[in-house]
Amino acid sequence: MWMQMGFDAGRVVGTKLPHLLVCVLLLGIADSMIGPYLVLFGADRALLSPLQVGVFLSVIAVSGLFVTSWLGRRFDRGAGRWPALVAVLAPAVGYLALSTTTSYALLLVIGAGLLGAGLAGFSQVFALARTHLDRVSGDASGRGTLALRSVFSLAWAVGPILGAAALAWRGYGGLLLLTSLAFALIAAPLLLLGPTPVTPRAAQQSRTPSRLRRPVLLVAASFMLFNTAMCAGSVALPLYLTRTLGRTDQDVGLLASTGALAEIPAALGLILLPARVRRQRVILLGMLLFVVYFVLVPAGSSLPLLIAAQVVRGLAIAAVNALGITYMQDLMPEATGRATALFGNAFITASLVSGVVAGAAAQALGYRAALLLCGLISAAGCLLLISARPAPRDELLVVPHHVGSAPGVEIKPDRDR
């Protein structure tokens, strides 16, 4: 069975999977270590108002949108490692600089010029993964991405704990320095990946950029709606649990951990799906499960039901986010960088609007209605995904081709090193 899954030792070494796993692990830890505490840094250390904190985070997100798109295009023109190095070294410098100042003007400059680039790290690492894993087979590419996504989820379960420990040990200065170090360390496995493979289609893309087709835009919009529901639900759920149901903070933490832990085995379980299964159908099932989740939570108040709902949430997120990366890349096989950037920007855009959506809905209609609204948003994402109707060749769970060095694959010359 494990040989059929494509992870025997020879293929692992040949596809550079260990280097990619380390990259994703370090990236997830770096992101999650600072993520929950960046707001608190602004409020407690820099003494910013809630509005100033919101503007600071929005500046980072908007910068991330532009940098992610730009680096995605640059990747398609050269398929090298330097865009990924920019995406991890810029935030390393940024968080180091953040530890030296609390000036609001400087914080905005650092956020726009350095921290925003860190949001492109996810898409760049997964674009590199696609090009390296494709050298073996489509099977290795699809299943390897699922393994990488599982490691990223695991890192997000570990990172906040490390962040809390660093904060308790050395305060915000220690947390920022440790985050800077984590981002900087990602450069080592990136450099060890070696020259980046490039296919003739990628070379053609560098001369003739492709236009975004209707199915690609619809799929990207469906992912954005799914992520909007996910992020808005994450804002509304703790308030619903504590203020409507009277649950404790410990219950909030338990439910959050349950959902996060459920994602890991769910994503790994997708590796066992046979190649004939259409990826779009599994993603659609995940979105439908998300709708079910947003119906279950407002419908009951017992802890067992809420825990079961969080398991459903983990299954839904695993199906959409783990398979969605490769699905988007398959829709744009000639532009891996742009495809992965589109997927990453769907989440960044969702994070920008979700706070307003959740806050406005909760204030106008209540927390229960806000969760139901998230279900409607996820249902709208389902409809967009159904209407996309990509070509059959874009829907396969894996795209098989010859094992070994793929036909027509070249290696970038030494300038990529």
Image (cartoon, rainbow, N blue to C red):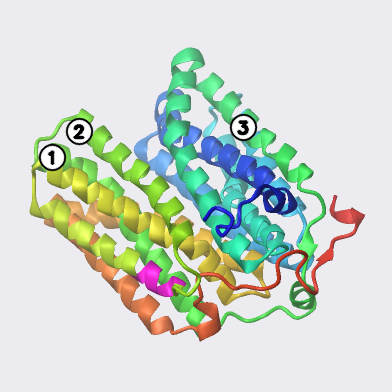
Label 1 is placed on what type of residue? Leu
**Residue displayed at 67% across by 59% down:** 133
The percent position of residue 76, horizontal first and vertical second, equals 72, 67
Q: Which residue is mark 1?
A: 303
Label 3 is placed on what type of residue? Ala
Are circles 2 and 1 on residues that touch, CB within 8 Å? yes
Which span of residues is magenta-colored? 279-284
**Residue displayed at 22% across by 46% down:** 237
The percent position of residue 149, horizontal first and vertical second, equals 51, 51
In front: label 2 or label 1? 1
**Residue displayed at 51% across by 44% down:** 151
Does residue 348 sit above or below 403 in this rendering? above
- Number of residues whose C-alpha sits closer than 10 Å to that of mark 1, classed few (under 14), some (14–19) or many (20 or more): few
| In magenta segment, residue 393 | no
Residue at the farthest right position: 414
Secondary structure state at the residue bearing disc 2 = helix
Does residue 347 sit above or below 77 in this rendering? above
The percent position of residue 400, horizontal first and vertical second, equals 62, 73
Label 2 is placed on what type of residue? Asp
